[in-house]
Image (cartoon, rainbow, N blue to C red):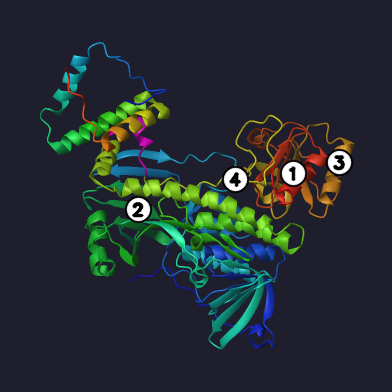
Amino acid sequence: MSETNRLCIEPRLARPDDFYQALMDLHRDLDPGRSAQANAQLILLLANHVGDEAVLEEAIAIVRRNVAAGAEPAPSA
Amino acid sequence: MHSTYTNPVYDYAPSPDQRAAAPAHHPVVVVGAGPVGLSAGIDAALHGIDTVVLDDNNTVSVGSRAVCYAKRALEILDRLGCAQPMVDKGITWNVGRVFFRDHQVYAFDLLPEAGHHRPAFINLQQYYLEEYLVNRARELEPLDLRWKNRVTAVRPGPERVELEVETPDGPYTLTCDYLIVADGANSSVRGMLGLESRGRVFRDRFLIADVVMKADYPTERWFWFDPPFHRGQSTLLHRQADNVWRIDFQLGWDADPEEEKKPERVIPRVRAMLGEEREFELEWASVYTFQCRRMEHFRHGRVLFVGDAAHQVSPFGARGANSGIQDVDNLVWKLDLVLRGQAPEHLLDSYDSERVAAADENILNSTRSTDFITPKNEMSRVFRDATLTLAEDYPFARRLVNSGRLSVPAVLDGSPLNTPDRDDFTGAMVPGAPAADAPVTTTDGPGWLLAQLGGVFNGLYYTGPEGIPEADRALLAALAADPVPVHTRVIAAARPASALPAGVTALGDPEGLVARRYDARPGSFYLLRPDQHVCARWRRLDGKRVRDALDRALGKEKTP
């Protein structure tokens, strides 16, 4: 868990399960190459929509630390 | 191979220096007669400095090499008195197109702002540029251009630099106050002094093919990512003078450079691109790799490195020769004032700090372009392709496509030579910025502002219809008569007719573009360096402030 200034980390999606399913549906029939392409296009579209380099840098920093630490999500209760 | 150009041969001519009993001395010696070294020699000669340019060869560039010359470089070459034949011979272009696989993704227009003398870019083979520089150099009395003079040893000392030079008649020794090193990316002088240029080598190879064809392609820059005729790689098509077209094929790191430049390998690649029916002839081919690197410092005592010898970038963005010419523009006026004893020697340290910062900006931009064009790993290729896919329909992604961020002049905004603003101004002409051009009227009729500036410190004094107050007129006369003079251009909407003191001339601003580009109002005063960069500006002329700013620009005041 990291401190953030600009990046909102509180829940904002009204229907989180719907979003998650839409994301899974996007990838369902894709091979790994096409999935990677889909993710890349999604990141670029959303990054432009966010439109704030400071927010994007915070998000990148979180992911960099998580991946460097090999962080696994905590098991749910 | 076909040839549209025959390299001139410049004869070796023995110099009296070679028979001198004691080593001959010249204030400035330049090593290397490429675009940057020739510019340095010409600039020094225009300042009246006795200058020798040494080159180990006897002709201009073999092959077209650097072909894109940017507006700022042309403005500097104008100051050196040789841009016109380059612009006349060169190809002016504004439109670029980017293709991904088999279709166009988008087009861009450099949309040149009206009211500038020079275009955003011309394309011209390097050999023409060098030939016109040589022609200009030969007109200048204090400049001695010595072909087939190869420097074999350099001995820098506290008082002077000593050189050993090899010629067809044997060796001789020369000394100079300052040595300008412009002997290119593989600088032998840099090696002799045990100095290094450090950075990144890109693991990729590119084939350059110059082909001659009568093509009906428009005069545009076309860049392909992953085209059907050259799968998995990029290709660039650019027009030069004489119906010569430059084609760059990305080859990948595993390509064999000796094999790939053979005509039997090059011609099928070109044919695949242009189509079977297109007639063309191959003029020149070369295979190269990219490096982005620089020396830690460009000044080493009395030895000053310029151009590719000091810093090297990948070619995407045209930041090589263009930045080398800006190095010269920055350095030579400082050398001149130091040689005349009018500025302390540490003024030369500002050449180092200003041009190191500019080199870093160029290296950053060209590294980013190269990373886009040559993805380093699978995921960078995925993102590049995602960007190109989106760019066709979604305008935001076009801004991410990077086939070269084209050369723009450095704004020297961190320079210790600048005097920070104390008055309110808007617009781009901040201290450190290169002066913007604008149409003006002179005593000889219509002209251009930049043609009225440079070589010495200049003032720009904007005035209204009421003219100049008498006190200001006296001050402008005094500034023009100072030991380091400031020659002021008095500018008004209609050119003032009243007599002005020596060193002060009047210009009209018929379209109001000087006022707009400089955010100038009656009374506004700009102090410009001899390289046409802004060093200070005020809303009212104040003699003490101008002279303090001049002292700072001369390095007499070390900290702001």
In this rendering, do the residues under marks 1 and 2 share a single chain? yes
Q: Nearer the viewer, mark 3 or mark 1?
A: 1
Q: Which chain carries label 4?
A: B
- Residue B14, horizontal then vertical, whole percent: 61, 85
Question: Label 4, label 1: how many angstroms apart (C-alpha)?
Answer: 15 Å
Q: Mark 1 lies on which chain?
A: B
Amino acid type at circle 3 is Arg
In this rendering, do the residues under marks 2 and 3 share a single chain? yes
Rendered image: mark on residue B549: 1
The region drawn magenta spans: B390-402
Question: Label 4, label 3: how many angstroms apart (C-alpha)?
Answer: 31 Å
Q: Residue at x 36, y 37 (%)?
A: B400
Amino acid type at circle 1 is Ala
Rendered image: mark on residue B473: 3
Q: Nearer the viewer, mark 4 or mark 3?
A: 4
- Badge 4 marks a residue whose secondary structure is loop
Question: Label 4, label 2: how many angstroms apart (C-alpha)?
Answer: 33 Å
The reply to whether the magenta stretch includes residue B394 is: yes
Question: Label 2, label 3: how many angstroms apart (C-alpha)?
Answer: 55 Å
- Badge 3 marks a residue whose secondary structure is helix
